[in-house]
Image: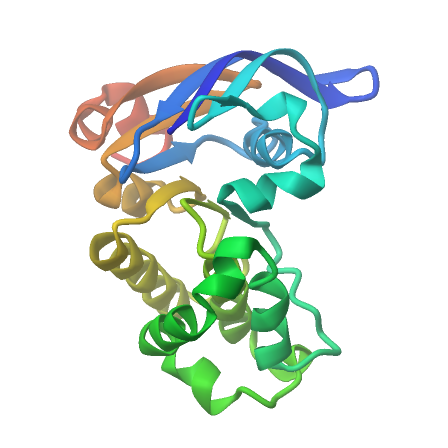
Amino acid sequence: MLEIAALCAGYGRLPVLHDVTLRVGEGEFVAIVGPNGAGKSTLFKTISGTVAATAGRVRFQGEDLLAVAPAARAHLGIAHVPEGRQVFASLSVRENLEIGAQTPAGRAAWRENLEKIHTWFPLLAQRAKTLAGALSGGQQQMLAIARGLASAPKLLMLDEPSMGLAPTIADEIFDRIVAIHANGGLTVLLVEQRVAEALHFANRGYVLEGGRIALEGTHADLQRNDRIRAAYLGM
């Protein structure tokens, strides 16, 4: 579904990504882990178009994504849930979801998707008229994920969904993500600081260090890797 080859990107004269190559197959759950500052969020921003690539190739379902305007990429079926949640605080929960549904697929499947979203996140149905800014951090993260789902995406990119959340709330968010992938058949690309959980639930994983892919493999391969166990799993 998503193929990235020799991708380079950065901010002005500051390079961040160096020759990054990875792939995400349809229906897969793929995790990208690594230390802070490794370029994980920059990778997502390059895929969604808010950071320009300086070299390399990105293809989504066979289409050259770098030739597609950033604003049009969501309409291809890519939903990017950024770190820090970034909900529209002055709008209600329902209005946030309606904004997420402004793709052709999202508009066509609005009622069906809203029912699914309320099944996965029942609190959002209860708080439909509540301003998003009045929600707790965990509730805002649920809303951010749900807003991405409202677009009826083919690929859901989640950037640090557990960031800033209490462990019990982060566990709940993770459980919902796993359920969405398992029950909906949605392709998921996850950047996550909770390395153990990310690798446990993912089909495959990549380790990004210093803007480069340092390791890749199945979740079992990476969990057995001594370097991963020492650096990220505390073992």
Rendered location of residue 87, percent (x, y): 65, 66
Is residue 146 visible in the rendered image? The answer is yes
Is residue 16 visible in the rendered image? The answer is no
Tell me if 234 is positioned left or right of 182 in this view.
right
In front of the other: 62 or 78: 62
- Up the image or down, 33 lies above or below 226; here it is below
- Up the image or down, 215 lies above or below 159; here it is above
Tell me if 133 is positioned left or right of 219 in this view.
right
Identify the residue shown where x is 47% and y is 70%: 110
Which quarter of the rendered picture does the N terminus lie within? top left
Rendered location of residue 136, percent (x, y): 56, 78
Q: How many marks?
A: 0
Rendered location of residue 69, percent (x, y): 70, 33
In front of the other: 2 or 135: 2
Which quarter of the figure has residue 231? Answer: top left
Identify the residue shown where x is 40% and y is 63%: 170
Tell me if 58 is positioned left or right of 69 in this view.
left
Identify the residue shown where x is 63% and y is 29%: 46
Identify the residue shown where x is 54% and y is 32%: 40
Rendered location of residue 182, percent (x, y): 21, 54
Q: How is the image coloured?
A: rainbow
- Up the image or down, 217 lies above or below 100; here it is above
Which quarter of the figure has residue 154? Answer: top left
Which quarter of the rendered picture does the C terminus lie within? top left
